[in-house]
Image (cartoon, rainbow, N blue to C red):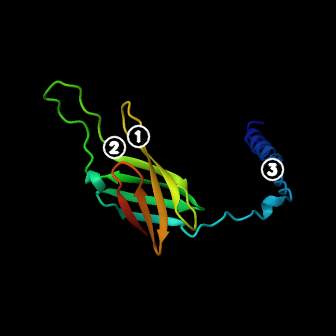
């Protein structure tokens, strides 16, 4: 009996394993998802990069913007922005200047369109700006409508 016990265990495990076969996957239902409508494509789709002039603040911004199906998402970075400095006068420290701006909006193929820029800053100040953008030949022109009034010419990149 001791000789047959391992053989019975092996045969028992094999029969259990063969009983656990998977059923075939059900066929997907026929619906409109079989032929989805393609997303609208904008003539401005792609990645845009460039540097602005300093404007009245004398602080140029580096822009990196992606336009996908007309939706604008990107950022601009101020390389001259400074964080908190040592406080030698023991007065309240000044708020740090915004160094990173998040840019959002919807692009139009023809004519100018508006973008919103929100500063990434800590503290109580919430800074938001408006930008105006337009296509000019093979480039994208972005202008601040207030504040430093910087202008950037972005190229596909």
Q: Residue at x 49, y 65 (%)?
A: 134
Instruction: Point out the image quarter for the N terminus.
Output: top right
Q: 10 Å neighbourhood of mark 3: few (<14), some, or many (≥20)?
A: few
- Name the element at disc 1: loop
- Relative placement, left or right, of 91 versus 112 is left
Q: Are circles 2 and 1 on residues that touch, CB within 8 Å? A: yes
Q: Residue at x 76, y 43 (%)?
A: 13
Looking at this view, is 137 or 65 the one in front?
137
- Name the element at disc 3: loop
The residue singled out by tag 1 in the image is 127
| Labelled disc at residue 137 | none
* Residue 123, image x, y percentages: 36, 31
* Residue 136, image x, y percentages: 46, 71
Looking at this view, name the residue that lies furthest to the bottom.
Answer: 137
C-alpha gap between disc 1 and disc 3: 61 Å
* Residue 125, image x, y percentages: 38, 34
| Labelled disc at residue 98 | 2
Q: Earlier in the sequence, mark 3 or mark 2?
A: 3
Instruction: Point out the image quarter for the C terminus.
Output: bottom left
Q: Residue at x 41, y 36 (%)?
A: 126
Numbered disc in front, either 2 or 1: 1
- Name the element at disc 2: loop
Q: Residue at x 51, y 55 (%)?
A: 114
Q: Does any portion of residue 37 appear in the rendered image?
A: yes
Q: Does any portion of residue 157 appear in the rendered image?
A: no
* Residue 54, image x, y percentages: 28, 57
Numbered disc in front, either 3 or 2: 2
Q: Earlier in the sequence, mark 2 or mark 1?
A: 2
| Labelled disc at residue 21 | 3
Q: 10 Å neighbourhood of mark 1: few (<14), some, or many (≥20)?
A: few
- Relative placement, left or right, of 47 versus 6 is left
Q: Earlier in the sequence, mark 1 or mark 3?
A: 3
């Amino acid at each position: 009996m001791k000789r047959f016990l391992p053989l019975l265990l092996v045969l028992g495990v094999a029969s259990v394993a063969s009983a656990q076969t998977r059923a075939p996957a059900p066929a997907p239902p026929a619906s409109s998802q079989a032929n989805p409508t393609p997303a609208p494509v904008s003539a401005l789709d792609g990645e845009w990069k460039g540097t602005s002039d300093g404007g009245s603040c004398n602080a140029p911004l580096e822009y990196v913007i992606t336009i996908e199906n007309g939706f604008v998402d990107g950022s601009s970075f101020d390389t001259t922005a400074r964080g908190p400095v040592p406080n030698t006068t023991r007065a309240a420290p000044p708020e740090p200047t915004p160094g990173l701006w998040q840019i959002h909006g919807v692009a139009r193929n023809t004519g100018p369109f508006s973008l919103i820029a929100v500063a990434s800053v800590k503290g109580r100040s919430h800074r938001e700006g408006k930008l105006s953008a337009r296509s000019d030949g093979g480039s994208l022109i972005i202008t601040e409508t207030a504040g430093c009034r910087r202008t950037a010419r972005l190229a596909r990149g």
